[in-house]
Amino acid sequence: MRVVGLCNPIVDFYLYDDKILLNGGGTVSNILVNLSSFGIKTSIIGYYGSDHLGSYAKESLELAHVDTTNLERKNFKTKIFFIDENGTTSACPFCGNKRKNYKAKTNIKEFIREDDLILIQDFYPMRDLPNKIIWDFGYSQGIIYMDKQELEALMFREYYMVNIKKSVLGTVLKKLDITFCEFKSSMDIEFLIITDGKNGSKIVYNRKEYDFKPQTFSEIETNGCGDIYFATFISEFIKKNRTDTLDIESIQNLAQKNVENVIS
């Protein structure tokens, strides 16, 4: 079993203390890298840019033992995000320019195995795949342009695991005009995480809800924390092979330790 991410790798520029740090980036890529470090087989399907940043993003994944066999080089400039103490933006702080997203790869079925788990982010074009889907949903802007029927089709299909931001969930509930209880009962999902940044998270598993408050750290840099948090649960879910009931509180403690390693 592999976790196969569908995305085009990007690059993050960290702007701190008058320094610029370069790192491979993107939620799907970050989750794959973390899963690989936990001993889970991972692969990525998509396109990488023909510029030096595209090569850097690809090599960053390879160094983390993510299979990049199905990353195809295309003639485009790699998407960049800039991260500083004020947050994350795709606009260059020096010239104000933004690089556009490149189209998603469409011919993916030939690269996917029957038991692969498919990892996607936000509104990645979902195909009619028989595989289980792991969905990280942290961006709500696209919801604005959907009618109710489109959003219902998106939310109420079968998923393996979903990680959704509380603010995004609020937008979904308002758009669908339903309560959280109605939302839970309508989703065909085995595991749901609702994250609220520094305010903690809610987990729904086996029809039971778990509320967790975050630990307090002296210094917090939140970028990447959500990715390793979700990756911890994905890893433990896979390792248990869904045959045993998960000890959610134990996995939460492990996830918090992994988050602490990222921000310390």
Image (cartoon, rainbow, N blue to C red):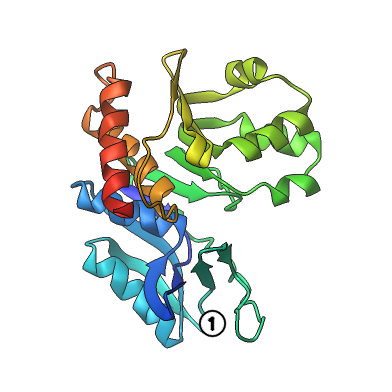
Which image quadrant for residue 68? bottom left
Q: Residue furthest left?
A: 39
- Give the residue at x 50% y 67%: 83
Tell me: 61 left or right of 147.
left
- Give the residue at x 29% y 75%: 59
Q: Toward the viewer: 45 or 168?
A: 168
Which image quadrant for residue 236? top left
Would you say residue 111 is visible in this rendering?
Answer: no
Q: 12 above or below 195?
A: below
Q: Where does the image place residue 69, in percent across and percent down from the top left?
A: 30, 67
Q: Where does the image place residue 36, in percent across and percent down from the top left?
A: 24, 52
- Give the residue at x 64% y 77%: 98
Q: Residue furthest front?
A: 218
The amino acid sitting under disc 1 is Lys
- Give the residue at x 71% y 29%: 173
**Which residue has dot 1 on it?**
77
